[in-house]
Amino acid sequence: MKMPRVKKEEIEERVYGTKMKTIERKHGVDFGLDGELELGVFLKKQGYAPLADMLEEA
Amino acid sequence: MDQIVGVSNFEFVREQPIRVRMDLTFQHILDLLSILSLETYSELQKSSFRKTIIISTASIIEGLLLYLLTQKKSEEECAQRRKKYRNVNEIYLLDDVRRIVWAEEVMETSDFSFSKINFHQITHLCSEMKFILPEMKKRLEKVRDLRNTQHIGNVDSVDREYSKEDLNFVFSVARDVKKIVQCQV
């Protein structure tokens, strides 16, 4: 099966240092967090350390 | 700059279409996990999100291991070889279920295509070719079991709930598989 083409702007790579405000903005939600909090730190705080480990450093 | 564009979490995957698919799936997992942290969802809804996350994480694991296989081995090397006997002739009848025969022995190679193998076959081949240790094979089988309970037509009990521990187990396997593949390609 041929996969549909993906436009470059559809890919928003998330890395360890991606700010939570970026994700909040995308979903139109407020996590009630410091927007400057890094995604990797957020995941660790939520108890998902193995997933945080998968994120690349920026 | 608060949004980092151009960095892949699977930079070592050289085939761009595969890398993009992995990044998109990983992005989906991260989005769902972020949403999971919101209090607005019931436990049942959160369990449904976790199901989707497990399916997506299993597909990344599968994709990584398949990528490893395709980088290290050819389809011919992965195809199974088995002995077949032709022109079987009976020499002596031992009893109702056993007989001594002479025949022509032929080594046959089964049809094999990377595009047609499933999670179980990928795991089996990676283990056979010593890309993964037996312990990892067991963990991968558990991931497959967790994922397979998602098939509605193939269960005999009411769907289970998926916990944070299930997620972390699958994530830990994905993290370790990523390291294994990263080191070997």
Image (tube, grey):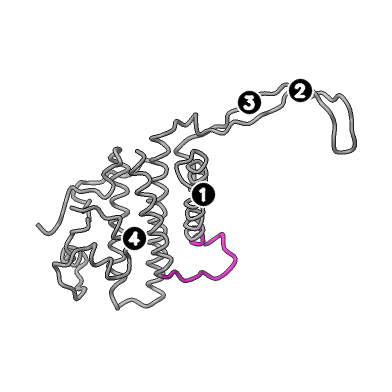
Secondary element at image label 3: strand
Residue B33 relative to residue B61: left or right? left
Q: Residue at x 63, y 25 (%)?
A: B107
Q: What is the CA distance from the residue labelled 1 to the residue labelled 4?
A: 21 Å
**Residue placed under numbered mark 4 in the picture:** A50
Q: Earlier in the sequence, mark 1 or mark 3?
A: 3
B151 falls in the magenta region? yes
Q: Amino acid at mark 2?
A: Ala
Which of the two marks, 1 or 4, is nearer to us in this view? 1
Q: CA distance from mark 2 to mark 3?
A: 13 Å
Q: CA distance from mark 2 to mark 4?
A: 56 Å
Between A40 and B115, which is closer to the camera in this rendering? A40
Q: Are marks 1 and 3 in contact (CB under 8 Å)?
A: no
* Left or right of residue B111: residue B33: left
Q: Chain of mark 3?
A: B
Label ID, residue B134 = 1
Whole-percent x and y of residue B48?
41, 68
* Residue B107: mark in rendering: 3
Q: Are marks 1 and 4 on the same chain?
A: no
Which circle marks residue B177 in the picture? none
As drawn, B80 above or below A45: above
Q: Secondary structure at mark 2?
A: strand
Q: Quadrant of residue B30?
A: bottom left
Amino acid type shown at disc 1: Pro
Q: Residues within 10 Å of mark 4 (few under 14, many from 20)?
A: many
Q: Which residue is mark 2?
A: B103
The region drawn magenta spans B148-163
Q: How many marks?
A: 4
